[in-house]
Amino acid sequence: MPDIPSLFGGGSRADRFDDIDQFVPEHLPDPDVFLDGHRVLDGEDHVAVHRVARDLFEDRGVYDVTFGYNLARLNLDRRHPEAGFRYAEDRDDPSVLLAEFTPTTPFCPQSKTLTVGAFRAWNGLADRHDYDRVRVRVAPMHHHAAAINAELDAMDAADSQATGESDRNGETPAGDDDGESESGAVSLSEEFEAALQRLSSEK
């Protein structure tokens, strides 16, 4: 999905964004409790993982409705230096990636949709990266962090169980099939387009 100009305006791309190949700590959120005690990625390690995130989010339509761009670009947006993703490898199992999302405000209404979308993108396209599993959480600064993270925790458990069963049976985990989705299901891309139309009609 191509970038869609933000409904709220802004400067040129060169003025607004860091390059995808740059690691600029002052333009990123600090790692929070979900990453505490784990091997937090920085430098080229962070950049390499975030490049993968960008591609996965593009394929799965994980877009920020407010700004009209691939969610991975939030990390590069200089207007929001305390928002975006930070990553760490699990201290006990480096095959597990931890991704912590800090939204732009404590009341961001998209936080659940975006973190669930990120979880599904990472784990639904597992053949596109080197991690066995990716766990996603929203930072505790969000006012619904506990409820959102409880749902993500349940998704972790279900994904882990499905992966274990598929490994034993030699089958693809349910939900990872890129074929037809369930009847009536709405993709994240469709949700994004619908929300964008609602915002446009309210102007």
Image (cartoon, rainbow, N blue to C red):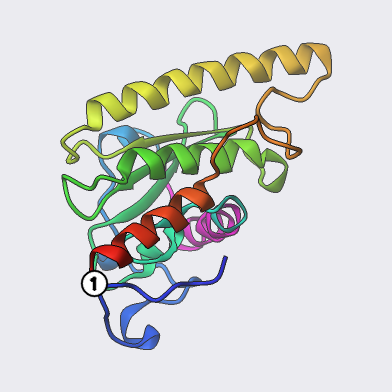
Where is residue 43 drawn, in percent x and y? Answer: 44, 62
- In the picture, the quarter occupied by the N terminus is bottom right
* Residue 161, magenta (yes or no): no
Residue depicted at x 69% and y 48%:
128
- In the picture, the quarter occupied by the C terminus is bottom left
Where is residue 184 drawn, in percent x and y? Answer: 59, 33
Where is residue 170 drawn, in percent x and y? Answer: 84, 18
Picture layout, residue 175 above or below residue 78: above
Give the image quarter of residue 161: top right
Prevailing secondary structure class for the magenta stretch in the rendered image = helix
Give the image quarter of residue 121: top right
Mark 1: few/some/many CA within 10 Å (<14, 14-19, 20+): some
Residue depicted at x 55% and y 61%:
51
Q: Nearer the viewer, residue 72 or 176?
A: 176
34 lies left or right of 172: left
Where is residue 75 drawn, in percent x and y? Answer: 37, 62
Q: Nearer the viewer, residue 171 or 110?
A: 110
* Residue 53, magenta (yes or no): yes
Disc 1 marks a residue whose amino acid type is: Arg
Residue depicted at x 24% and y 65%:
81
Picture layout, residue 141 above or below residue 41: above
Q: Secondary structure at mark 1?
A: loop
Work out whether residue 3 can be spotted.
Answer: yes
Q: Which residues are magenta?
A: 39-56
Judging by the rendered image, the residue that carries numbered circle 1 is 79
58 lies left or right of 38: right
